[in-house]
Image (spheres, rainbow, N blue to C red):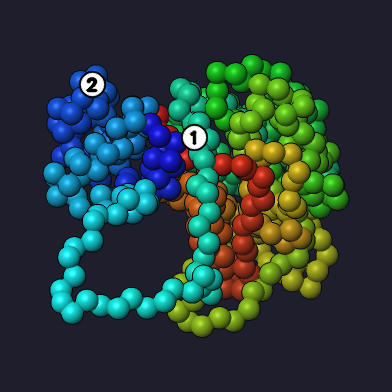
Amino acid sequence: MDPKHSQILQRHRHDIVTTLNPADICDGFLSKGVFTQDMIDEIQSKITRRDQARQLVISLETRGSQAFLAFLECLRETGQHDLAELLQCGDGARLPPSVPVQPPLIPLPIPSETKGVRPTRPSIQCYKMDASPCGICLIINNVDFDPSFDLKDRKGSNIDCDKMEKRFKALNFEVIVKRNLKYNHIIQEMAFLAQRDHSVYDCCVVIILSHGTEASQNNFPGAVYGVDGASVPVQLITNYLNGQNCPSLQGKPKLFFIQACGGGEKDTGFEVSSDEVEPSLSGTDDQMDAIPISSSSDSLSTYDETDARATLPTPSDILVSYSTFPGYVSWRHTQAGSWYVENLDRVLEENAATDDLVTMLTMVNDAVSQISAKGLYKQTSAFFHVLRKLLYFRSSQS
């Protein structure tokens, strides 16, 4: 396929997946010789219409130079004119203008530079994410801490762990779960992960559920605690998978999701108009993932805990998603799990088939920001990345 046509498909991927009915055009593709019967069977083997549409786009990009035009023709033949016109306009190819009715209209002059019009930018490419399994997902779930270090057990964390394990298995990852790791064991697991051969995989994911604290680093502030009370800097964790230390992950996305504390400040938020947010109140069983910090606001129940912070990284193809903004606490419900993981799991379930990761994490930010602890304290998650391409997950059924 012509690269410009492939870029159009990538640019309008969301529109195609949400509106296309693949069953209507498969026969047309077969009769025009665009797809083989095996390719049609592969598309139809997908359970949902959206998954079928995604597979159709993936297969279409592998066909010849006439595949895009054949796609437009099939869309028109099956009455899907709006989608056909959207893609045709993206190609810059317009239908011939009709003969004007007399008297002819006199066109207005078009200025060379129009203010307020966004410039056209080149299409962003997508990461390859079709390996099966897509990659390794390591989950470190620290629940039971040494009481001598004033770190409480993290009730509700097993709920978070179960959600993330099921979600990333559904996203076609090989999931490895490690529980209650000390400092040395966290380092050991990261070293093992870096030493693995990832050449057959397209991605790598690390999820850490633990207590945390502030730590000043060049790229990734914040640190997570081992169950022995020793903290591991987030920057050290990410360094294990960078291009220098893990060559088989060079050019591939490395994703880190951190549910841990990065500060002791509690955010009370600010007033907005009633139509700006839909507030959601959390229950009385909310906890924080941090060493207690003396404060006038520490009169909350013992169920409230805080999460982590971050700054912009410099290595390429890395994304770090934190459950809270730098310096602030993050909340975890002892029976329902953390606000962050609960919403991350929901957004991935509802949107992974159509939206890229950065878009979905923005949805998570919005959802978390609308919850309140005790009707008073707020939280917003944050993510920082140096991804070079869009990242779309594929389900295990794709």
Residue 141 drawn at (x, y percent): 64, 36
> In the shown orientation, is residue 387 left or right of residue 23?
right
Residue 26 drawn at (x, y percent): 19, 33
Q: CA distance from mark 1 to mark 2?
A: 32 Å
Q: Which label number is shown at residue 168?
A: 1
Q: Residue at x 37, y 78 (%)?
A: 108
Q: Is residue 83 visible?
A: no
| Disc 1: CA contacts within 10 A as few (<14), some (14-19) or many (>=20) | many
> In the shown orientation, is residue 208 left or right of residue 26?
right
Q: Which label number is shown at residue 15?
A: none
* Mark closest to the chain's N terminus, 1 or 2: 2
Viewer-nearest residue: 91 or 214: 91
Q: Which quadrant of the view contains residue 1?
A: top left
Q: Residue at x 49, y 35 (%)?
A: 168
Residue 90 drawn at (x, y percent): 37, 51
Viewer-nearest residue: 285 or 183: 183
Residue at numbered disc 2: 36
Q: Residue at x 85, y 47 (%)?
A: 217
Viewer-nearest residue: 397 or 315: 315
| Disc 2: CA contacts within 10 A as few (<14), some (14-19) or many (>=20) | some
Mark 1 vs 2: CB contact within 8 A: no
Q: Please tell me whether residue 370 is drawn above or below residue 227 in the rendered image.
A: below
> In the shown orientation, is residue 172 left or right of residue 269?
left
Residue 271 drawn at (x, y percent): 59, 81
Q: Please tell me whether residue 36 is drawn above or below residue 104 in the rendered image.
A: above
Q: Which quadrant of the view contains residue 103?
A: bottom left
Amino acid tagged 1: Phe
Viewer-nearest residue: 186 or 159: 186
Q: Is residue 218 visible?
A: yes
Q: Secondary structure at mark 1?
A: helix
Amino acid tagged 2: Thr
Q: Secondary structure at mark 2?
A: loop
